[in-house]
């Protein structure tokens, strides 16, 4: 059974940093693209970032480019998202997903990030 | 990139069919056959229902189907069931290595 378990969310002040992690199991992690998708409270889904199966290619939404960094450790089956210079508008549930370059086949349950003073 | 346009809500009675539209531009929906649809029940994570415009993942009932014409993609749910009541989101590749979601549609089963 595919499992994606996010962690690292919490309350952070504007301008602060947070690192999200996603532990993957039940599939060959190193064979799949991984994505981060977020959802602000009561709002829709927004794609944030994705990384190729071998970690050599990374892409970001314009809204987070230069502030967020996606990475993966295929030896540990772990996906990460380093978030710097956080803003109030980054407040959301962050989902880790696995799939192809353009599709999220499986989703984790999400971790809530709240940016507030 | 601007979000794809979906109706805020649709409704139907059990057994009926409903169609949810997803309108973009020639730079996203119209330019690529990479449209996917996700179902999200309240408080739950989204679930993939359709990918590559019309392909259905294993385990998704064949009551769910997808199509595309020009800059508009559509999700059709036939034989509506109570458990289909949820939010539905479309997503498309938008070029320049980006992906864009629709604003979401709330499906109510009357």
Image (cartoon, coloured by chain):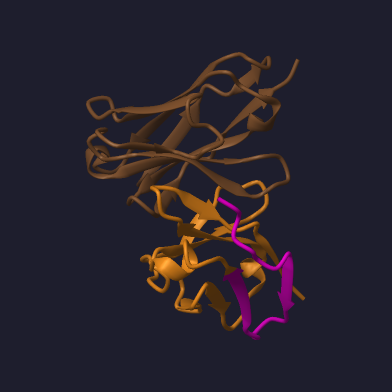
Chain colours: A brown, B orange
In x, y percent, where is residue A34? Answer: 36, 41
| B86 lies left or right of B57 | right
Q: Position of residue B67 (x, y in %)?
A: 47, 78
User: Which image quarter holds the C terminus of chain B?
Assistant: bottom right
Question: Which residue is situated farthest in the bottom direction here?
Answer: B16
- In the image, residue B14 lies in the stretch drawn in magenta: yes
Q: Is residue B83 left or right of residue A73?
A: right
On the question of residue A80 being in view, the answer is no
Total marks in image: 0
Q: Is residue A5 left or right of residue A86?
A: left
Residue at coordinates 44% horizontally, 48% vertically from top-left?
A: B98
Q: What residue is at 45 percent from the left and 56 percent from the top?
A: B94
Residue B98 vertical position relative to residue B78 in the rendered view, above or below = above
Which residue corresponds to the image point at 61% horizontal and 78% vertical from the top-left? B19
Residue B28 located left or right of residue A73? right
Q: Position of residue A107 (x, y in %)?
A: 46, 46
Whether residue B68 is visible to the viewer of this picture, yes or no, is yes
Image: magenta residue range: B1-22
Classify A27 as above or below A7. Answer: below
Q: Residue at x 64, y 80 (%)?
A: B18
> Foreground residue, B101 or B25?
B25
Q: Is residue A29 above or below residue B25?
A: above
The answer to if A114 sits in the magenta stretch is no
Percent position of residue A26, x then y = 31, 42
């Amino acid at each position: 059974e595919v499992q994606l378990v996010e962690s690292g969310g919490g309350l952070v002040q504007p301008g602060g940093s947070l690192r999200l992690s996603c532990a993957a199991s039940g599939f060959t992690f190193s064979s799949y693209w991984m994505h981060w998708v977020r959802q602000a409270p009561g709002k829709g889904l927004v794609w944030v970032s994705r990384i190729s199966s071998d970690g050599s290619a990374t892409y970001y939404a314009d809204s987070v480019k230069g502030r967020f960094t996606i990475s993966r450790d295929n030896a540990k089956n772990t996906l990460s998202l380093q978030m710097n210079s956080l803003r109030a508008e980054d407040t959301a549930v962050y989902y880790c997903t696995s799939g192809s370059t353009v599709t999220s086949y499986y989703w984790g349950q999400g971790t809530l990030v709240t940016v507030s003073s | 990139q601007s979000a794809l346009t979906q109706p805020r809500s649709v409704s139907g009675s059990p057994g009926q069919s409903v169609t949810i539209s997803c309108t973009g531009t020639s730079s996203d929906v119209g330019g690529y056959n990479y449209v996917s649809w996700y179902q999200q029940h309240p408080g739950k994570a989204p679930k993939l229902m359709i990918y590559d415009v019309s392909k259905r993942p294993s385990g998704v009932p064949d009551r769910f189907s997808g199509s595309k014409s020009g800059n508009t993609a559509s999700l059709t749910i036939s034989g509506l069931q109570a458990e289909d009541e949820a939010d539905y989101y479309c997503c498309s590749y938008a070029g320049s290595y980006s992906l864009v979601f629709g604003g979401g549609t709330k499906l109510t089963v009357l």
